[in-house]
Image: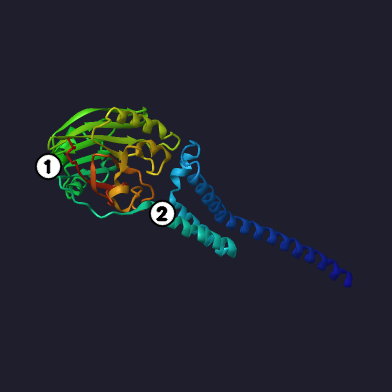
Amino acid sequence: MSDQSTAHAVPRSCLRQVLGAVGRVLAGVARGVLAAGPATLSLLVAVVVVIRLTLMDRAAFLAPLYYAAPPPALTLAAAAAAVGWWVLRRRWLAGALAASALACAGWTWATMWQYHPPRVSETPAYRVVFWNVARGVAGWQRLAATLRRHDPDVVILSEAAVHAGIVAQHWAPVFPQHKVTIAAGGLALLSRLPIERRGGGPLGDRSYGLYQHVVVHFDDVPLHIIQVDIHSHPLKPRWVPLRALRGLLDTLDGERVLVVGDFNTPSESFYFRPLRQHFRNAFEVAGRGYAATWPMPVPLLAIDQAWASEEIDVLRCEHVRSWLSDHALLVLDIALPMRAE
């Protein structure tokens, strides 16, 4: 009897040991899986911060990571990692990531918020409105009505996909005093002032982006408007279309030039440095509020931009949020002071 009890006890003891070992392994795997999320986010935050402070988007293979993780996204990622480490009771890691989140929030505040009051000019002011209307999926009538509320002198549209029928049905009744120009690739411009189209075409080649060149006469003062639409392919380097744009602008040296459009490139990109030598980012010099324009309703990237040459007086630049597009609407007030004789 004693021998049988001992024989039964040994297998039970072994079974408990095996089950205990399996349980410990599974618990370790579970902890590893749970830790993988915060660990991955922590590593991502560290890597992207280094990239943004050093290489930026100069290396084509790193550019998608640079574009996908601006300071607001880094703030959210660091905060999520801090919560994850706290749940796992890794207090010092949670504290480190919380501090990183605060630093990224300060970075966002310092680089993506502007507080310039509107300015008044002694010369007439004009309003230019730019909007990527997302191919009109929200309805052309609603889009036109929203634009009309801003009383623009010039309306510039990307992803408009308009044709003569849409213009006649939806735009002409809302903007009866505006003349419409339509370019390939969904670019459109409406102006209540006299205009002449100077050209347009690919930036680099058609797979990188498009532009159209229009001259608007503001009380006999010509303003060259270059509308751009750079494609968003993550693996296509932005230096190609931006270098082509720079070459175009070099032919307009000495003219008043306004460059407007969906650049699909954040304004802090390394490749805007040549443009900054002679042009000013309108939101940086006259904006008020948050710089990011895409994607709505939680914009993270400042990709819809206006750049003004030195002889344009930028009075105000505002980003207006709307549910009708995944891009914010850009409202720009400018004046064109007379040149000194």
SS class, disc 1: helix
Distance from disc 1 to disc 2, alpha carbons, whole Å, reads 42 Å
* Amino acid type of the residue that numbered disc 2 sits on in the rendered structure: Thr
For image coordinates 49% across by 46% down, the residue present is 53
Q: Which of marks 1 and 2 is in front?
A: 2
Q: Quadrant of residue 198?
A: top left
For image coordinates 50% across by 37% down, the residue present is 61
Q: Where residue 176 sits: x, y (%)?
A: 11, 40
Q: In this view, does 232 lie to the left or right of 30?
A: left
- 176, 170: nearer the viewer: 176
* Amino acid type of the residue that numbered disc 1 sits on in the rendered structure: Pro
- Residue under numbered circle 1: 173
Count of residue discs:
2
- 316, 45: nearer the viewer: 316
For label 2, the crowd category at 10 Å Cα-Cα, with few meaning under 14, some 14 to 19 and many 20 or more, is: many
Q: Residue furthest front?
A: 341
Q: In this view, does 134 lie to the left or right of 223?
A: right
- 119, 209: nearer the viewer: 119
SS class, disc 2: helix
Q: Where residue 159 sits: x, y (%)?
A: 28, 38
Query: Could you tell me which quadrant the N terminus lies in?
Result: bottom right
Q: Where residue 247 sits: x, y (%)?
A: 34, 28
Say which label, 1 or 2, has the lower sequence index.
2
- Residue under numbered circle 2: 108
Of the numbered discs in the image, which one, if any, rests on residue 244?
A: none
Q: Quadrant of residue 244?
A: top left
For label 1, the crowd category at 10 Å Cα-Cα, with few meaning under 14, some 14 to 19 and many 20 or more, is: few
For image coordinates 34% across by 50% down, the residue present is 291
The answer to whether residue 1 of the structure is visible from this angle is: no
Q: Where residue 168 sits: x, y (%)?
A: 14, 36
Query: Could you tell me which quadrant the C terminus lies in?
Result: top left
For image coordinates 12% across by 42% down, the residue present is 173
